[in-house]
Image (cartoon, rainbow, N blue to C red):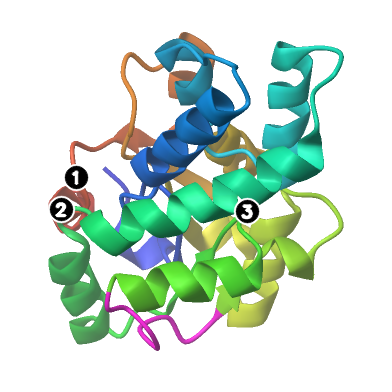
């Protein structure tokens, strides 16, 4: 439980928290890998959740070893991702719309803070029908270091003109929770993957099953 009076703003992650994009990325990485004759285990792809694009590529390059062509992989991934979302779209995660309505009723400012590049974030939001929903979007382009560094959340708090310590940060990944914790914000997790490791749980104020549960946890 967190006292409502302690919260000046809410910061949303995007991938895996507001949008069910993680599965679209995993599908694209898997197909791109297969086209290049690499086979990525599920557990490896799941471990990439929450990381910025350059960190994802570094981990994939390390997994694939010598001879891996990052440029070709990025080109194939982009093609595979577009093909996937053209068929399946991008789903909004359970509870987002009801939580947004609650925040608007309570006049609680909110924004989006994502490890995705701004152009990619805007494309995903548009595909999910959420263009213009977030008054402020802080993306990978806007900071020097991506999550798990705290820069994105510190920038988001500054954009909202509130102290980071009074921002409730909603995240689905260990990297995001670490970033929120290091920003001295109030980290709350809605896991996209389970189980959650003990170190991540220790950094959370509490854990939710979906976004719709948040209002009931504010005292």
Alpha-carbon distance for marks 3 and 2?
21 Å
For the residue labelled by badge 3, is the local secondary structure a helix, a strand or a loop? Answer: loop
In the picture, the disc for residue 94 is 2
Q: Is residue 104 left or right of residue 140?
A: left
Q: Are marks 1 and 2 in contact (CB under 8 Å)?
A: yes
Q: Residues within 10 Å of mark 2 (few under 14, many from 20)?
A: some
Instruction: Please report the residue visible at 19 percent of the width from the left and 45 percent of the height from the top.
Output: 210
Q: In this rendering, is residue 3 above or below 195?
A: below
Most foreground residue, 120 or 148: 120
Q: Around disc 3, counting alpha carbons within 10 Å, would you say few (fewer than 14), some (14 to 19), or many (20 or more)?
A: many
Magenta stretch, residue numbers: 129-136
Q: Which residue is mark 1?
A: 210
Please indicate, yes or no, whether residue 147 appears anywhere in the rendered image. Answer: no
Mark 3 = which residue?
Answer: 115
Q: Residue at x 80, y 63 (%)?
A: 143
| Magenta-drawn stretch, dominant element (helix, strand or loop) | loop
Q: Say which quarter of the image contains residue 85.
A: bottom left
Residue 5 lies, in percent from the top left, at 35, 66
- Report how many numbered discs are placed on residues in the image: 3
- Front-lying residue, 216 or 172: 172
Q: What secondary structure is found at the residue carrying circle 1?
A: loop
Picture quadrant where residue 179 is located: top right
> Who comes first in sequence, dot 1 or dot 3?
3
Evaluate if marks 3 and 2 touch, with contact meaning CB atoms under 8 Å apart. no
**Does label 1 or label 2 sit earlier along the sequence?**
2
Q: Is residue 116 above or below residue 125?
A: above
Residue at the image point whose x is 33% and y is 34% from the top = 192
> Looking at the figure, which quarter contains the C terminus?
bottom left
């Amino acid at each position: 439980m967190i006292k409502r009076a302690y919260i000046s703003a809410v910061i949303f992650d995007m991938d895996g928290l507001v949008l069910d994009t993680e599965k679209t990325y995993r599908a694209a990485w898997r197909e791109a890998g297969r086209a290049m004759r690499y086979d990525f285990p599920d557990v490896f792809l799941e471990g990439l959740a929450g990381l910025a694009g350059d960190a994802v590529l570094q981990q994939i390059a390390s997994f694939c070893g010598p001879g891996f062509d990052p440029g070709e992989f990025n080109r194939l991934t982009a093609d595979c991702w577009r093909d996937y979302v053209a068929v399946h779209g991008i789903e909004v995660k359970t509870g987002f719309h009801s939580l947004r309505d609650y925040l608007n009723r309570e006049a609680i400012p909110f924004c989006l803070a994502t490890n995705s590049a701004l152009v990619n974030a805007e494309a995903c939001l548009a595909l999910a029908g959420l263009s213009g929903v977030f008054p402020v979007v802080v993306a990978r382009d806007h900071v020097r270091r991506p999550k798990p560094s705290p820069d994105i959340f510190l920038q988001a708090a500054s954009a909202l003109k509130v102290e980071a310590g009074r921002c409730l940060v909603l995240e689905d990944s260990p990297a995001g929770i670490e970033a929120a914790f290091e920003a001295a914000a109030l980290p709350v997790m809605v896991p996209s993957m389970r189980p959650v490791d003990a170190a991540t749980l220790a950094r959370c104020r509490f854990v939710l099953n979906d976004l719709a549960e948040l209002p009931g946890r504010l005292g």
